[in-house]
Amino acid sequence: MTQEAPARRRHEKYDRLIAAAQARPRLTVAVAHPCDEASLGAALEAADLGLITPVLVGPRPRIAAAACGRDLAAFRIVESAHSHDSADRAVALVRAGEAGALMKGSLHTDELMGAVVRREGGLRTERRLSHCFVMDVPGHDDPLIVTDAAINIAPTLEEKRDIVQNAIDLAHSFGIEVVRVAIVSAMETVNPKVPSTLDAAALCKMADRGQITGAVLDGPLALDNAIDRGAAAIKQIQSPVAGRANVLVVPDLEAANMLAKSLTFLADADAAGIVLGARVPIILTSRADSRLTRLASCAVASLFAAGRRAETPRPGVQG
């Protein structure tokens, strides 16, 4: 008796994101130091799918070695001396208007972000930089945004305002019409002994006063009653967000990172990563990312950049 192979999980949410991005003009992306097979391959495959036009920034011999025999004649290569130089030159391409996004190659995240946040010659804006995971979670109808899991370690209330607004802007860019933001804590009541509940209440009032726009906010909400209607009903929480959140704002980097990785490794979710708040979106990938996750990260950046360029309605990516 032969054993049947396990069914391959479908990724409808990421497939919709990629299809929506393919309907947009290609995004020119400065790829910083694509000197291993994984990072270079992701950029080239995204180009093959019509998502991006990559500009490869790095030492030419190392890029060629990572190509594993693929002809790179069709791609622009900007020569650099080493990884720090790759980051600087990639940022310079954006500042010169020659690229509309950055993509992390095989250099360390700190090297790339150091070039981005540099006061002279960087890509800073008045908005705080923050990271969003766009997660494809089995059993969850829409892409789920989790923030901030990679940039802001212990954000202040003011920084959380920007983190929330960045996530809202991202959600709108890929077609979520009603953005429902849950400010997550360990409980759903305000407790002066738990600072994250105070921040949650303040953020909701900031939304009431127009300091945060484009979404419905509620918090504090515990994770269960943020995403599960049954849990919200048991707690008798009357809210347009409870049980239906599509954005989860978590108190600090540790909690957000553990939540995202728990979903990835225990719930078979995928997590596409992007940094917002700079002049252009920044595609952050990890060596552990799957092929589809890398492509979805490129698609999310493309949709976000397109949304910033145009006022026309965006292609919907919801079912």
Image (spheres, helix red, strand yellow):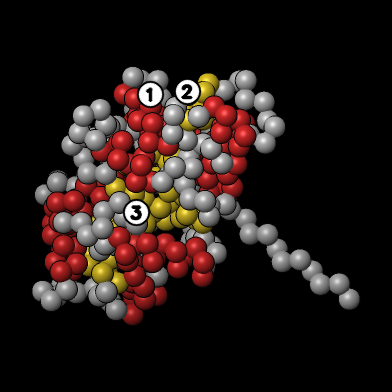
Residue 78 tag number: 2
Q: How many marks?
A: 3
Residue type highlighted by circle 2:
Val
Question: Can residue 95 be spotted in the picture?
Answer: yes
* Secondary structure of the residue carrying numbered label 1: helix
Pinpoint residue 80: horizontal percent, then vertical percent. Answer: 44, 27
Q: Earlier in the sequence, mark 2 or mark 1?
A: 2
Q: Nearer the viewer, residue 184 or 40?
A: 40
In which quarter of the view is residue 213 placed?
A: top left
Q: Amino acid at mark 3?
A: Ala
Name the residue carrying label 3: 150
3D distance between C-alphas at marks 3 and 2: 28 Å
Tag in front: 2 or 1? 2
| Residue furthest to the right | 1
SS at badge 3: loop
Residue 93 numbered mark, or none: 1
Q: Position of residue 312 (x, y in %)?
A: 38, 28
Q: Secondary structure at mark 2?
A: strand
* Left or right placement of residue 153 versus residue 102 in this view: left
Q: Is residue 238 above or below residue 212?
A: below
Between 208 and 115, the one nearer to me in the picture: 115
The answer to whether mark 2 and mark 1 are in CB contact below 8 A is yes
